[in-house]
Image (spheres, helix red, strand yellow):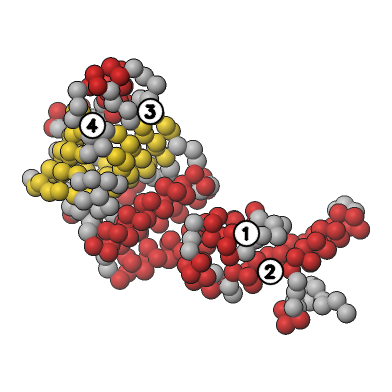
Amino acid sequence: MSPIGFTTRGLSKRQQYEAWRSWHDSTFDGSPDRPPEDGFVAKSKIWRTEGFALVRVSAPAMKVMRTKTLIRRNPVDHFIITLGRSGITKLNAENDTRDVPAGAPFVLSLGHEMLSARGPGDRLQLYLPRDSFRELAPVLEAARGTVVNGPMGTLLAEFLELLERNLQQIDVANHGPLKDAVGSMIAACIAPSPDRIAAAKSQLDAGRLEKVRRAVRRELRSPSLGPDLLCRLVGASRSSLYRLMESQGGVTRYIRRQRLLESHAALCDPVGDKSDRGDRRGVVLHRRLRVQPRLQTGIWRQPQ
């Protein structure tokens, strides 16, 4: 999944803000803190999946608003969870004004008026269509205009960052489970309960485990395949990788088992010249396995 990108860099200073305004005109009104003729270098990346969209925006300081006139002209009714990366966002929504610190996610609805004054920098925005998250809609309605603080806010912020880092590697076939995992995580962070926290954990662990399995399959013949390489490939710490793989018997045992299965499949393949292609493939994998007597499975025997 590749993001859709847009940037004003390369345009003349007088054209930059107008191009940016036109890009967002149907959704937001805005006004920059500096005169438009001074230039407005900004960029945006959008990842669209089945059910939601994630947007990374980098822009100068400006005010962004959703007015009654704009809502009538474009009545889209998505929820947005925004995470500012730097500075304070001055937020006016739901008849309340507050300062939102960097790193604290906050919840808005495009169906209601809002105004935010943002400093220069990056922000992440998760767009959640109401129709795609009907079961979550009451939770998001109750959270409109609020900031998710404390440990649950930190967890949600880390999840948004993790989502951005890994979206490009997710197969289209996994978009449905991913949407469910996103919904479970948001519910657990915004309106935590033991059931919601457990549901979010199981959804996230299932997705992470599948990512580890794909990485192992890709790197199965690599002599460097091990915990360190897997941590880099899946973006996990060593402790979290070990915890995740406990149900599979551990990282090393899982890799060894997958190599044994592939060797066995190669040796049993009736197609091709086993004495050439298949046997050499099995021998190479066997040498990498270094099977110990206590781990003999009947497929390989310790050399005499």
Inspect the image, locate mark 2, and give the three-letter code of the amino acid beneath it. Arg
The foreground one among 36 and 247 is: 36
Q: Residues within 10 Å of mark 3 (few under 14, many from 20)?
A: some
Q: Nearer the viewer, mark 3 or mark 4?
A: 3
Mark found first going from the N terminus, 2 or 4: 4
Q: Residue furthest front?
A: 38
Q: Is residue 235 left or right of residue 191?
A: right
Inspect the image, locate mark 3, and give the three-letter code of the amino acid beneath it. Thr
Residue holding disc 1: 216
Name the element at disc 4.
loop
Residue holding disc 4: 28
The foreground one among 217 and 8 is: 8
Mark found first going from the N terminus, 1 or 3: 3
Q: Nearer the viewer, mark 1 or mark 3?
A: 3
Residue holding disc 2: 256
- Image location of residue 161, percent across then percent down: 38, 51
**At x 30% / y 47%, what residue is drawn?**
85
Query: What is the spatial separation of the Cα atoms under label 1 and label 3, in whole angstroms?
Result: 37 Å
Q: Nearer the viewer, mark 2 or mark 3?
A: 3
Mark found first going from the N terminus, 2 or 3: 3
Q: Residues within 10 Å of mark 1 (few under 14, many from 20)?
A: many
Which quadrant of the figure has residue 180? bottom left
Q: Residues within 10 Å of mark 2 (few under 14, many from 20)?
A: many
Residue holding disc 3: 7
Mark found first going from the N terminus, 4 or 1: 4
